[in-house]
Structures are given as C-alpha cells and as structure tokens.
Image (spheres, rainbow, N blue to C red):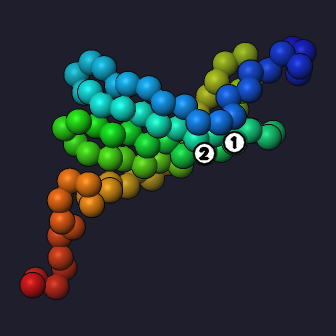
Amino acid sequence: MDRRALMNIEGDWAGNIVGTNTGRVFAEFAQDKGITGTVRLNDDAFGIFVYTCTGTVADELELGLRSPTIDRGKRGPKSSSSGV
C-alpha cells in the first residue's frame, strides 16, 4: 500500500450515540507511527466514561480502548469510604 494514501485521523472528533443507548462521543487523536488519544462517552443513562486508546491505521482503522473511568462529578456525589 502507498504510505501517502494512509488515512490521517489526527485531531478532535465528535458524534452521537444512537440505538439502545443514546448520548454523545468525543475523541482526541494524535497520529505518528500509530494512533493515541482519549475517547469520552457521555451516555444519557449511565454518565461519562473516559478511555485511553491506541491503534493503527492502514487499510482499516483499528482502535483499542482501555480502563474506563466514571466522572461522577457530573451525575452526583462520589461515595465516601469514611462512612461519614
């Protein structure tokens, strides 16, 4: 494959989640030899999930997402382990 024809997805991306779950998706990608970045899913029912991602782009785009975290500050207080 001609390397000049590779897809460049570097930058900020935004879109909608539709189907059984609904919400928004926001992604920030950097691209060098591979792809790295952050993907944020804002699910209308379950809140915000933040993933780090790595991947490759050749004939197809392949991304792997890791370690979701929940931003509970947008949905309510965090639970306290002190029992107070």
Establish if 74 lies above or below 13: below
Residue 8 at x, y percent in the picture: 74, 26
63 or 18: nearer the viewer: 18
Residue in view at x 36 percent, y 32 percent:
24
Q: Is 32 situated left or right of 19 in this image?
A: right
Q: Is 2 situated left or right of 50 in this image?
A: right
**Which residue lies under the disc numbered 2?**
37
Q: Is residue 35 visible?
A: no
Residue 5 at x, y percent in the picture: 84, 15
Crowd class of label 1 (few under 14; some 14 to 19; many from 20; radius 10 Å): some
Residue 71 at x, y percent in the picture: 32, 56
In the picture, the disc for residue 30 is 1
Labels in figure, total: 2
Q: Is 72 situated left or right of 80 in this image?
A: right
Establish if 38 lies above or below 25: below
The reply to whether callout 1 and callout 2 are in contact (CB within 8 Å) is: yes
